[in-house]
Amino acid sequence: MNTETAVIKWRGLQNYQQCWQEMQEFTNTRTEKTLDEFWLLEHPPVFTQGQAGKPEHILAPGNIPVIKTDRGGQVTYHGPGQLILYPLIDLRRKNLSIRKFVTILENAVIAVMQDFNITATAKCDAPGVYVNEKKICSIGLRIRRGCTYHGIAFNIDMNLEPFKRINPCGFNQLEMTQLTHFSKIDSIYAVGMQLVTHLNLSLGYIATTLHTELNQGINQ
């Protein structure tokens, strides 16, 4: 089995808790020969609070559920029109530190933005990707047994209003933005494939296989 092959799964709209449980199960049961996977999907509206998240950063959630999760970081919002990428990667096999891996994720998003002729940057003191000081992509990871789960939330074409109900990523008055504020897109799927292409180059996968699993677990 060639461990330099990655599996890409486009999973459509996925219930957050169900997907989180599946990531944990995948990570807990994988072996040193298990292929790395990229899961691309969207979530129904949900706020997620990281392990060290402070409740005061959740201002007025209204009818949107709040889920405490085991990733790093504070509170963020997920909803339709936001591209989620969960990289299930064996960092030990890739000989990568967590900091280096976060940089690879940030640079892949920055490269996608460059594909659209948009200048984006990362910040060493606040992980994620920014355009004109507005955040377009959040990153939160969990490492278990040397392997990653959780990942990237990349705002593409969504309702940004729920971000005003929280202090995004724990920052008061942090403004959020999204790709369609700057450029037209073909589809969220197409952007996801661009993102995975850049990650493949950075992580050195020599081949990928694509699986499509649409409309699974859509009930929040």
Image (spheres, rainbow, N blue to C red):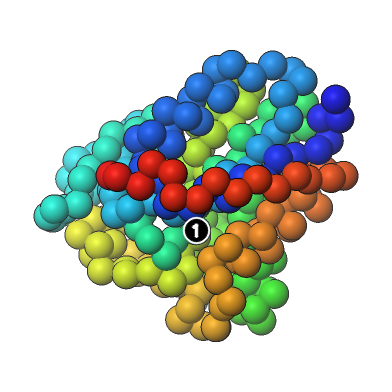
Q: How many numbered dots are placed on residues in this image?
A: 1
- 24 lies above or below 193: above
- 17 lies above or below 85: above
Q: Is residue 220 visible?
A: yes
Q: Residues within 10 Å of mark 1 (few under 14, many from 20)?
A: many
The x, y position of residue 49, in whole percent, is 30, 40
Q: Is residue 125 visible?
A: no
Q: Quadrant of the C terminus?
A: top left
- 189 lies above or below 179: above
Task: Name the quadrant containing residue 174.
Answer: bottom left
Q: Amino acid at mark 1?
A: Leu
- 196 lies above or below 51: below
Which residue, given by chain and number where applicable, does mark 1 sit on? 83
The x, y position of residue 211, in whole percent, is 65, 45
The x, y position of residue 10, in whole percent, is 58, 50
Q: Quadrant of the N terminus?
A: top right
Nearer to me, 33 or 136: 33
Q: Is residue 220 left or right of residue 103?
A: left
Nearer to me, 62 or 16: 16
Could you tell me which residue is drawn at 75 percent across and 44 percent down? 209
Could you tell me which residue is drawn at 69 percent across and 74 percent down? 115
Could you tell me which residue is drawn at 69 percent across and 16 percent down? 31
Nearer to me, 74 or 152: 152
Q: Is residue 70 left or right of residue 106?
A: left
For label 1, the SS is strand
Could you tell me which residue is drawn at 74 percent across and 57 percent down? 197
